[in-house]
Image (spheres, rainbow, N blue to C red):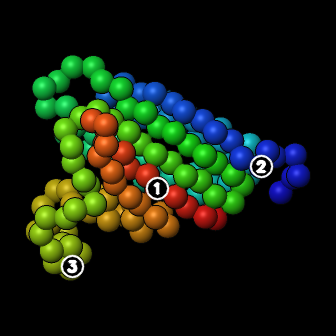
Amino acid sequence: MSNDSPASIVRTIKLCNRIDELQRLNEELESLGAVLGWSHRTVMNLMLACEELVVNIVHYAFPQGGEHTIEIHMLAAADSVEIAIKDGGAPFNPLERDGDLESLLTMDVEDRPIGGLGIFFVQQMMDEVQYEHAGGMNSVRMSKRF
């Protein structure tokens, strides 16, 4: 790794609550990865974790419809990243699971209901995932050391 990369980079990106906005987020993560020397796998894992959370927000946070903003705050370094994804949608803690995760994991694929494992995979990919609802905003914070 080159000594020319900065110690840390702070970025904020504001997305509209549309699936096509994921492209901008992915481009930002790729850009950070290139500057900081992250592996391709690291970038892909971060994209997947962010995508899971953003897709859930797009589909479920705003049942009344309309255009809303999703804020993504990133503190990135060569050896770690912290990401906070915030929205003003309906309060919802994705870390609280309904049902038995163990039974989902052991169930035959064709018998499994759609959904339910995305947040589990986010938790497996990241070192820490936390939820908070304050000031009318949902915030999922996640961090990873490489």
Give the vertical position of 117 relative to 18 (above or below): below
Residue marked by disc 2:
7
Q: Which residue lies furthest to the right in this view?
A: 3
Q: What SS does tag 2 mark?
A: loop
Of callouts 2 and 1, the N-terminal one: 2
Give the vertical position of 13 relative to 37 (above or below): above
Which amino acid type is marked by label 3?
Glu
Q: Which residue lies furthest to the top in this view?
A: 66
Give the CA separation, mark 2 to mark 1: 19 Å
Residue in the picture at 59% in, 57% down? 42
Q: Position of residue 111 (x, y in %)?
A: 11, 68
Q: What SS does tag 1 mark?
A: strand
Quarter-wise, where is residue 103 in the image? bottom left
Residue marked by disc 3:
102
Give the CA separation, mark 2 to mark 3: 40 Å
Is residue 34 visible in the rendered image? The answer is no
